[in-house]
Amino acid sequence: MRSVTYDLHIHSCLSPCGDADMTPANIAGMAAVKGLDVIALTDHNSCRNCASCMKVAENYGVLCIPGMEMTTAEEVHAVCLFRSLEAALAFDEYVYSKLQKVPNKEKIFGEQLLYDEEDTILGHEPNLLINATDIMFDEVWDLAKSYDGVMFPAHLDKTTTSLLSNLGFIPPGSKFRTAEIRNLGKFHELKKAHPYLEDCLIISDSDAHYLEDIHEPELTIDVKDLTIDSVIDLLENGLDYLCK
C-alpha cells in the first residue's frame, strides 16, 4: 500500500459560488505547490472543467480525478468521481438533463465559467448549477456506478445540504462505503448516532471555493498505487479495500 495526500472535493469557477481565481490551471498549480498527490474537481452538477484541470495537473505531476458534487432531489450533496473523463462527461450530460433549469443571475449567484487548460474562457453556463436535480439520493450510488464511478455523501456534519441535515438519517439499503466529514473531530459523535458509519471509510476534504482553502498535505489515504482506478477502488470498497 502507498499513502498519498488528497483533496477530493474542490470547486472551480464553473460553480457559481467558486471564486474567480478558481480556474482549472490555478487549482492544479495550487495543488502542486501545496504538495498534494491527488485531487478531484467536483463542481456543482457539472464535470465540464475537469478536462482542463486534468491536463494541467498531469503536467505538474498531480493526479486529478474527474468528478461532480451532485445535488439530489432532496437537496443533498453527493460527490461522484469517475474512472475516466469520458464517463464523467456522459454522467454530466445525464445529470444536466435532470437539473431544474433556471437561468443564472450572475450578479446574485456569480459567474459560471468554462476554461481551457491555458485559462482562456471558453464560455458561460447559462442555467444555475446549484439547483436540485430530480434524482433521489437512494438512486445515486447505482447511477454513478453505471457510469463507472463511485458516490460518497458530502460533508455529513454540515448543517445544510448534507444527507444528515436534510434527511436526518442514513436511508436503509444505502450502499456507500465511504463518507466525507468536514471536521474529523465529530466522527465519534456521528458514528454513535448513525452506526452505519462504523463500517465506512471516513475522509475529509476541503470543499474549497477559494485557492487558499485547498487542503494542505496533512491527510492521507492508502492505495495500491497512485492511479484513478486505485483511488476509486478504495472509495467504492471502503474499509474492505484496506483488508485485502
Image (cartoon, helix red, strand yellow):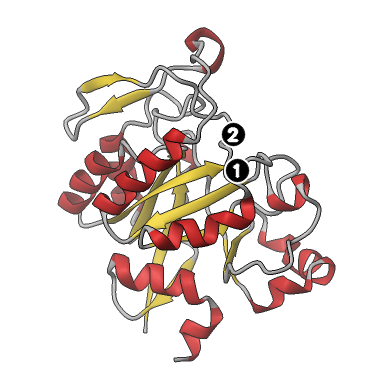
Where is residue 8 drawn, in percent x and y? 44, 54
* Label 2, label 1: how far apart the Cα atoms are: 6 Å
Q: Are marks 2 and 1 in contact (CB under 8 Å)?
A: yes
Residue at point 54%, 55% (across, down): 140
Q: At which x and y percent is residue 216?
A: 45, 53
Decide if residue 97 is in sight here: yes
* Residue to which mark 1 is pinned: 72
Would you say residue 36 is visible in this rendering? no
Question: What count of labels does the image hold?
Answer: 2
Q: Amino acid at mark 1?
A: Thr
In the rendered image, the quadrant that contains the C terminus is bottom left
Q: Secondary structure at mark 1?
A: loop
Q: Which residue is mark 2?
A: 132
Where is residue 96? Give x, y as percent: 43, 34
Name the spot of residue 201 as percent of width and height, x first.
58, 72
Q: Residue at x 35, y 62 (%)?
A: 148
Name of the residue lying farthest toward the right: 193
Structural crowding at the residue carrying mark 2, measured as other residues with C-alpha within 10 Å and reported as few (<14), some (14–19) or many (≥20): many
